[in-house]
Amino acid sequence: MKQRKTIIAAAVFAFILPMMVQAGPRIYVKVKPPARKVVVVKTARPYKNAIWINGRWHWNGHKYVWKAGHWVRPKKGFVWIPGHWNHNRRGWHWIDGHWKRA
């Protein structure tokens, strides 16, 4: 019985740990982010079915700086949900893009 509880605890920990690592402290910015840049992707897909992840405005602690987009390999059975800036009473904060089961 003790071994079974240990296995269950390890499985739960293995599932939750990656989420804890990704979820760092939320940083709020009082300055509204600039409008999204319209970027024309001029590079060819580096491999079949490559997905373009748009660039974004990143707060560096003093000002917004543009982080360029990039190509990624698709995850079978998943769709990419783009990141976005969200606003609430504390200010603006970034919600990371992520893969969602299709």
Image: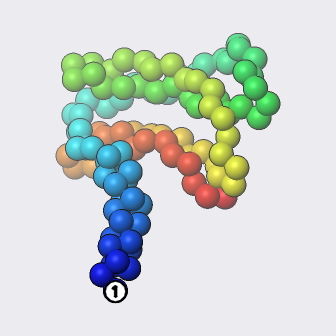
Judged left or right of residue 39, residue 10 is: left
For the C terminus, which image quadrant? bottom right
Nearer to me, 46 or 59:
46
Q: Residue at x 56, y 48 (%)?
A: 99
- Residue at 55% across, 23% down: 69
Q: Nearer the viewer, residue 11 or 39?
A: 11
In this view, the residue farthest toward the top is: 42
Q: What residue lies at 46% left-to-right and 27% top-to-bottom?
A: 56
Query: 10 Å neighbourhood of mark 1: few (<14), some, or many (≥20)?
Result: few
Residue under label 1, please give it. 1
94 with respect to 53 (left or right):
left
Q: Is residue 91 in view from this perspective?
A: no
Quadrant of residue 72 within the rendered picture:
top right
Left or right: 24 as drawn, with respect to 56: left
From where the camera sits, is residue 5 visible? yes
Q: Position of residue 3 (x, y in %)?
A: 34, 77
Q: Residue at x 60, y 45 (%)?
A: 80
Q: Nearer the viewer, residue 33 or 15?
A: 15
Q: Secondary structure at mark 1?
A: loop
Position of the N terminus by quadrant: bottom left
Q: Pinpoint residue 66: horizontal percent, then vertical percent.
A: 43, 18
Q: Amino acid at mark 1?
A: Met
Q: Is residue 102 above or below residue 11?
A: above
Q: Hey, which quadrant is residue 10 in on the image?
A: bottom left
